[in-house]
Amino acid sequence: MTDLVSSHLAATGPTPRPRVSDEGLTLPAEVDATTDVLFDGRRVWSIAPFEFRPDSSGDRWVPWPRLLMPSLDGITTVTVMEHHNERVIFEEDHAFGAGTQRVRFEGPGGALRVIDKWGFIQRPFAHQSREIRDDLLNRAELILEILREECGLSAWIAFGSLLGAVRDGTMIGHDSDVDLAYLSSHEHPTDVAREMFHVSRTLQARGLSVSTRTGSFCAVSVPSEHGQATPIDVYACFYVGDTLYETASVGAPLPREAILPLGTVQFEGRTMPAPADTDALLEASYGPSWRVPDPAFAYDIPRAVKRRFNGWFIQSMKRRRYWDRLYGGMLGIDIPAEPSPFGAWVLPQLEPGAAVIDLGCGNGRDSLWFAEQGHPTTGLDFSPATLGRARKKAAAAGLPATFASVNLYDYRTTVTRAAIVARELPAPRTVYARFLLHQLERDGISNTWRFLDMTLRRGGRAFLEFRTHRDKERPHTYAGYRRFLDPDEICREIKAAGGSVVDRLEGSGLAPYQDEDPDICRLTVVWQR
């Protein structure tokens, strides 16, 4: 095997960083192409080296993906190779943690899994049976027929599916879903969104399980034998002037003649609809090197395109995939079902029978518990999957708990939900937000203050719990997205938004979980009338 590292390390000093550690990999400076990482000969992840900053020697430190970390306990042979030619960069045995068994990155029933280019766990087509792939394609053909015959739309296989079809007529081995697209005749985003909602309703009326993700994107969920549903994504493409927009990633000048009239392409032995000029559309989508397979491909989205899509369509996908997978049990993390320590701390402070709004309710464990204690509770969250399960639990137990969606990254839906809650629940109200603020980015926190202003203006309190800046260096049980907030800064923001902090408690020992004892802050807040 070719080893590019030995001579490089000899030239850069006697104490180089190890190539493989429990925390990550070190890629030598010579590596600049997409790189595969294999455990015992099975690909688990692919890396785009340019996404990681080189150190003074040119080497790149690449941490393990957070969703892979829980599986890193045991022994494996780590192979790092270039994707396009399978040239081995280095290979060595490594013992992760204290485990003595071979590392297995598998799902239910031993299904092989990988980390995809978005950082999520997937089961790629290379590890799926012929029966699963045929069922997926049967559903895709049904959706194309519905779009054509019932919605009057010209639709085709798109993105990764079109790439595989044009390259060699098959599904891409490292891909994990089927992509479809249609060309809208509308140019105004509102009309595009209305059409997408009509598409979603039409597909649902035909018995398909549909989730509308944005005003230009919906997903049809197809059950599979390995327990994880496989999506068929349906995208609206549309023109504004001479620019074609497809998803929130691509806005490119492309003549309409490149799309219509549709042609055909062979895909897994089937004749499927395709754009008139497949090469032109694929180059607009993936760049001039689209013919070269790249499992680590990432869009370099122009800021203007990103801002337009965020303004045109609700930001309903921001981190939603992570939460859907977390509460769907796809990340291998056990979510507690018993009441939290924060809930137990808040309960004695509530007036008898007071209504509770559980903002960011997660799996609803505290919402259901407050309801059991006689408090009518409304649980609000971002993930439709977890809301559905919480509703079923409340109904089965006959509890006064309801659940609804809220997207704190979208101002319109935030104020709409706040207005509904303010109308339906009597004042004074209690807003309860456990471990919410540190999971939000800046725009989400700003919208949270607006939500509190609207729901507490006529009386009530908010109880907030979040990780502090001191928690950043402390051990954490699970990897995952989180920020670490300065309580002083949060208090200043609350004051600027019209609120007043009436109680503040900080430190560790308040919310221990397994081996973790986070440093947290608890705030009790009222809002000016």
Image (cartoon, rainbow, N blue to C red):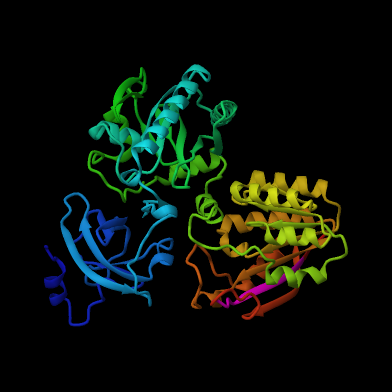
Location of residue 209 in the rendering, given as x and y in whole percent from the top left corner? 55, 35
Q: Residue at x 64, y 50 (%)?
A: 389
In the displayed structure image, the side of residue 336 where residue 114 appears, left or right = left
Classified by dominant secondary structure, the portion drawn in magenta counts as strand
Residue 101 in magenta stretch: no
In the displayed structure image, the side of residue 22 where residue 435 appears, left or right = right
Q: Can I make out residue 21 in this image?
A: no
Q: Please state the extent of the stretch shown in magenta in the rendering.
A: 516-525
Q: Residue at x 83, y 66 (%)?
A: 350
Q: Quadrant of residue 78?
A: bottom left
In the displayed structure image, the side of residue 183 where residue 398 appears, left or right = right
Image height check: is 170 above or below 122?
above
Q: Residue at x 23, y 41 (%)?
A: 289
Location of residue 337 in the rendering, given as x and y in whole percent from the top left corner? 65, 62
Location of residue 357 in the rendering, given as x and y in whole percent from the top left corner? 75, 56
Q: Quadrant of residue 110?
A: bottom left
